[in-house]
Image (cartoon, helix red, strand yellow):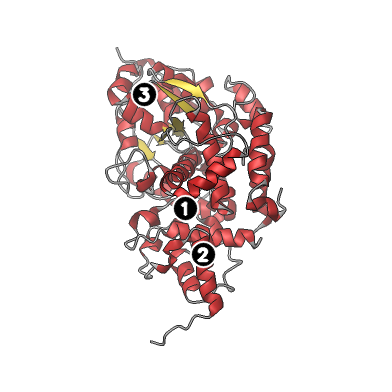
Amino acid sequence: MAAINLTKMDKEIIQKIIDHGGKGITKCIQCNACASVCPVAKAGFPLYGRLLFRKIQTGHFEEIIEDSSSWACQACNRCTEICPRDAKPFEIVFAFRRIQANELAISTSAFTPLMNLHATGHAVYSEASKELRQKVGLPAVPVTSIANEKAQEEIRTLLDNSPMGELGIF
Amino acid sequence: MEKCGIYLGCNIPFRAPDIEHSFYKVFPALGMEIVDMEGATCCPAWGTAPSFDIDTWLAVSGRNITIAEDKNVDIMTGCNSCFGVMSEAKHLIDHDPARKKTVDKNLALIDRKYKGDSEIYHVSHVLYKNIGIEKIRENVKYTLKQLKIAVQPGCHILWPSEVMAVKEKNSFFPTILKELCEVLGAEVPHYSKLNACCGMGAMRSTDQVRSIGLVKEKLVNMKEEIAPDMIVTTCSSCYLQFDGAQKILKEKGEIDFEIPVFYYTQLLALCMGFDPKNVAAISETPRDAIIQKIQSEARLLN
């Protein structure tokens, strides 16, 4: 079998995966145990764990940067539980997702929960919840950040001062 | 442990507040005081900060944890995703000094300090480990005898077991929820897709067709193998998926049956005699008939 000669750029991408939390990328031996338990693979998404890692390891990063499969990852961590190399596949998938996110190579729908989080402290919120809560005998709003200006200021301070604040999402 | 901070997350207070109300009914009645976590935010959900920057994720989770620390209580969460996000965040903060240093720096911006002395539990852990099966047995008024339950523990309560304060003996054959249902008198048979994913969460927002495909497989498997009277879960995301997807599948003619779905504390509250108008009043898949059956005179225990 011919050896794969990685370019300097390919090696930089592997380092980038490590820097974004996927340090196990160098441990993966392509055994496919992760994919055997992966809901993303089971549901038929094209770029599930093992294959994604193969593309990264062999210098095919540019052809996968816009694939949305990684965004279907539930973070269920079945893969982490069984990986015989302790590569923590979930961490590599999320490292790839972070690179996609920071290059804005993602669907715009991914931004709605983020904007909700910035505005209210909750990724999921709907005004209709007030009626639902009262229907079951609870106050219209819970004691969370939704009715707490100080909490909302705190969350905005954390987000605005983070690297996410520089992406122009908020 | 006689009291515990209740971390609500987003889905429970805003989409299924009857689950929230079931916490307020069940825990004090079983001797566990519930402490509010004022100003708690989203955990933050996997698709938000954890998908962009690890340190921002840890700062937001860390902030939530400080709310419980300041009240000297552990945290109990009813949402599996919140449980997974915060358990992993706590594990990273507690085991990686460089991450901890960055969390300290970020939380200093809002005058908060992470100490690391509040543990993170799931609602089912507190019921199973702290309150215990016997205490639950003593407080049940209606028995579920001759009713069959399909259990759905949900993913984020099981894996990665390394970061969790309470572990199953074998995370691929979980038994905690099974035991919690059996003590109510129900039969809880095994079905072969017990540990399969329901397809909710990130998959549902990325590709609804594939997501619903996973839950359909699981529903059909349950129906064929054990024909349950109800599905019981300890995950609010699984709850929303099983409850909502059945309506979609039925309208499309892809299934010809309906199985009522409960979050575990809703069912427990019903068995303890609490009013369904408070604890089990919102669902897409009808459950009035089974609720009536559960709270019937014939099922009253002495």
Q: Which mark is residue B214?
A: 1
Given the image, what chain letter belongs to the residue carrying mark 3?
B
Q: Residues within 10 Å of mark 3 (few under 14, many from 20)?
A: few
The residue singled out by tag 3 in the image is B1
Q: Position of residue B113 (x, y in %)?
A: 53, 35
**Vertical position of residue B72 compared to residue B159: above or below:** above
Q: Which sits in the foreground, B16 or A52?
A: A52
**Rounded to the nearest whole Å, what is the CA distance between mark 3 and mark 2?**
42 Å
Quadrant where the image shows the C terminus of chain B = top left
Q: Secondary structure at mark 1?
A: helix
Q: Secondary structure at mark 2?
A: helix
Q: Position of residue A120 (x, y in %)?
A: 67, 36
Extreme-bottom residue of the structure: A2
Q: Amino acid at mark 1?
A: Leu
Q: Amino acid at mark 2?
A: Ile
Kindly identify the residue that appears in the image at 37 percent across and 29 percent down: B126
Q: Which sits in the foreground, A144 or B191?
A: A144
**Vertical position of residue A44 compared to residue B269: above or below:** below
Q: Secondary structure at mark 3?
A: loop
The residue singled out by tag 2 in the image is A17
Q: Position of residue B250 (x, y in %)?
A: 53, 45
Kindly identify the residue that appears in the image at 69 percent across and 30 percent down: A149
